[in-house]
Amino acid sequence: IHRLRNGLSKTREILTTDIDDLFTSNKKTEELLEEIEERLITSDIGIQTTMELMENLSKKSSKISNANQLKTALRQEIISLFNTPSPTQEKISAKPHIVMVVGVNGVGKTTTIGKLAAKAAAEDKKVLIAAADTFRAAAVEQLTIWADRAGADIVKHRENADPAAVAYDSVEAATARGKDIVFVDTAGRLHTKVNLMEELKKIRRAMTKTIPDAPHEVLLVLDATTGQNALSQAQMFNDALGVTGIALTKLDGTARGGIVVSICNTLNIPLKYIGIGEQIEDLQEFDPAQFVDALF
Ligand code: GDP
């Protein structure tokens, strides 16, 4: 929770700094609500979600006469917007459990896979990483470093090889070697959107040859600093592939942490992980109550 508080400091600043002043300056309730509305929008909770929240908040406004009451009310309203339940231990029944990781370049996909691999390895799981973005040599290099560090296997082919072949080999290797979990890195070159989605579908098909219900998870990585843009990315990947979970990175670098609320409130996809820094411990399972606690 301490790391989380630090990670969310920029967003917290936007939402709660000088909130006491709002009361000492004798503002009218209406002005007060306008100020709150502006703060919510600045934090990137999104227009629609903000409207919803403000409507509920204004019903309570007669009972709010100091900063603490306001914070409590805001806290309650934000909590009520989350449709994600608190994290429950993920059921991993399949072995190997295949996690296909998707997202556009630069969002933190490689880093997220590295952190997840390290966490799984620390729980004594046997991990394999599939380097199925064969286009980015640098990403393969990074993944190799993460794999070495975690003591995980990595399957990689030469540069520009067929990504689907890497995925196929990875699933075969993981099955043969008795691995518990496979993280499949994928391409994220967005300028060829149709091609990208086709490539991702081909990767998925290649895996089902060995394991018919693979992948068991399609984890979409989104970058919090891109704000509402992240939502349209989610829509796009979800339409093409069916996303089962979201990892939202770089919350530490932005005041736009309200995007968390927006993602949970408008998408029907669970937010599973949040990234609040570069260390392994900075990838945390998302917990709505903890998140709100860290904000207020
Ligand atoms: P990819 O292109 O999607 O594979 O992105 P990378 O994994 O290479 O990450 C791009 C940059 O974002 C790297 O410098 C990472 O260290 C950084 N990054 C990833 N996640 C986080 C995060 O949660 N917080 C911060 N501050 N940086 C992050």
Image (cartoon, rainbow, N blue to C red):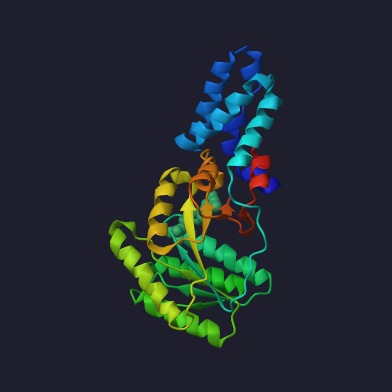
- Residue 141 spot, x, y in % from top left: 46, 69
Vertically, is 115 above or below 129? above
Vertically, is 5 above or below 94? above
The image quadrant where one finds the C terminus is top right
Vertically, is 183 above or below 276? below
Q: Can residue 89 be seen in this view?
A: yes
Give left or right: position of 160 versus 204.
Answer: left
Residue name at image x 39 percent, y 65 percent: 187
- Residue 277 spot, x, y in % from top left: 58, 51
- Residue 53 spot, x, y in % from top left: 55, 33
Residue name at image x 63 percent, y 22 percent: 61
Residue farthest to the bottom? 176
In the image, 261 versus 160, the foreground residue is 261
In the image, 37 versus 138, the foreground residue is 37
Residue name at image x 44 percent, y 45 percent: 226
Residue name at image x 64 percent, y 25 percent: 60
In the image, 208 versus 290, the foreground residue is 208
Give left or right: position of 161 versus 149.
Answer: left
- Residue 130 spot, x, y in % from top left: 48, 74
Q: Can residue 108 be seen in this view?
A: no
